[in-house]
Amino acid sequence: MNIETLDPDFCYRVIQAKDARFDGRIFTCVTSTGIYCRPVCPARTPKKENCRFVASAAAAEALGFRSCLRCRPETAPGTPAWAGTQASVARALRLIEDGALDENGVEELAARVGLGARQLRRLFLAHVGATPQTVAANRRLLTAKQLITETGMSFADIAFAAGYQSLRRFNDAVRASYGVAPTSLRRDKSAEVPTQGGNAITLRLGYRPPFDWERLLAYLAIRAIPGVEEISATQYRRSFRLGDAAGIITVAPSQKPNALSIRIQGDGVLPIRQIATRIRRLFDLDADPQAIAGALRNDARLGPRLARASGIRVPGAFDGFELGIRAILGQQVSVKGATTLAGRVVARAGTPLTHKDGSLSHYFPAPAALAAADLSGLGLTGGRIAALKAFAGAVARGEVNFDPCETLDEKIVELCAVPGIGEWTAHYIALRAVGEPDAFPASDLGLRKSAGNGAPIATRALEQMAEDWRPWRGYAALLLWMVPAIEAAALAAD
């Protein structure tokens, strides 16, 4: 969303209706109070003449407004990717979310996305309404505010988790924005701090409705890696190991509307911000259903499917390497077969949990460990073992990464340079592990069958057809995969 396209009349109607579809896309700066709010703020709607609308929380902060303590902008859905306007901005925003500006400067960030620092600043001002530094500072502040409000973490741990380089900088940032010390914010919101058991943290992550949780969970369930993931009808659980921290994550719908509840329990200093970012990508919480529907709803093949699954999300990955290994195992075998093989690989090369938790028994193997592991006797062909080891070695050496630095075409070239990875696997990894919304594995037999209503069409024909679905071809792929033609036809007949 370009900030110049914000229509004040339209935005005011959105906040009057408290329309959650625009949560995280529009923020209201109230000049009479100096506060900025989400469209869903429960407070009385301010007078129109006192409202100024911006496209990001960072833009509101840059104008001198402070976040509302009632609607809590820190719990809003993340900024949607501006894929339809400026892909470089979307990639830079992803890197900032990963902490790219916590220690390094804008020049390095700009170089990572292939731009000059001045050009990147200009694009951010046009599309986000704030500079990259302001966006990064805003993300640190809002992360800190959420951790103060929702957890019992020490302030030193919060400062580290939010990306501050010192406790003093954390204290100064909170005082500058809210006018009080962090202790006052926690005291004022003490009723909201849940009871934490052991070293456990519970957070709430928002999304824009509609959100098809059941369909997304079902897709992940049949692909769950034995020993690492456990999925029931209502929740997702997994083991994780990040740096010196390790533990269990549980994800389920929140009692609050349009949000998921995330419980993180583990040992070590938990990298909360990093975990939250990975969960957002796993469940595609920052998707913009309005923009996706606008591009796909009028297509004869996709429209009926979208009507049935209007809250479609791309199932992402908590760990890109893990998803890549799962994709290689899935080459030319059934989903069930690939799941069985993944469980064997984990049992052979993964690290056992100290205490088994339900069906969770292992941490997924690190790239270097898998590259060195003996994978014979697991039912894998010699070629498949070679591909797994080549991919693991490339990731361990840094030759393959899952950062959104490159364009889609550049990422495909990077992945296809690994022996054993072809176009299909590369696009699948780019879609789910990197989060490229336009990735499209056109050679997939399931896609070609679905697009041909049961009779597979040629790969080239599907590629030509998919040109009309840019920049959301990844969501088109999920509609073709996840919504059977018979289900879509039934809806059309209703």
Image: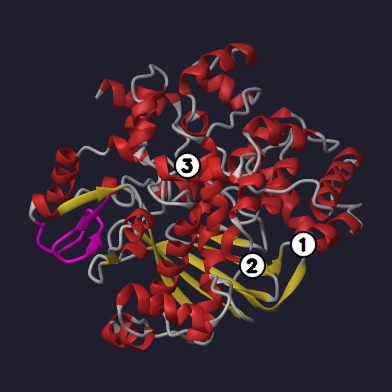
Going by the numbered disc 1, the residue's amino acid type is Pro
Distance CA(mark 3)–CA(mark 2): 38 Å
Picture disc at residue 482: none
Q: Residue furthest front?
A: 118
> Could you tell me the amino acid type at mark 2?
Phe
The magenta segment is 26-46
Dividing the image into 4 quarters, which one contains the C terminus? top left
| Nearest the eye: 125 or 300 | 125
Mark 1 neighbour density, 10 Å: few (under 14) some (14–19) many (20 or more): many
Please say whether residue 312 is one of the residues in the magenta stretch: no
CA gap between label 1 and label 3 equals: 42 Å
Tell me the crowding category of disc 3: few under 14, some 14 to 19, or many 20 or more residues within 10 angstroms, Cα based.
some
For image coordinates 82% across by 62% down, the residue present is 349
Mark 3 lies on residue: 122
Q: Residue at x 14, y 48 (%)?
A: 17
Query: For numbered disc 3, what is the local secondary structure?
Result: helix
Residue annotated with mark 2 = 240
**Amino acid type shown at disc 3:** Arg
Q: Is residue 488 visible?
A: no
Could you say which quadrant of the image residue 10 lies in? top left
Task: Identify the secondary structure beneath mark 2.
Answer: strand
Tag of residue 365: 1
Secondary structure under the numbered disc 1 in the rendered image: loop
Callout 2–callout 1 Cβ contact below 8 Å: no
Disc with the residue nearer the chain's start (2 vs 1): 2
x and y percentages locating residue 145 in the rendered image: 39, 73
Left or right of 399, for residue 247: left
Among numbered discs 1 and 3, the one appearing first in the sequence: 3
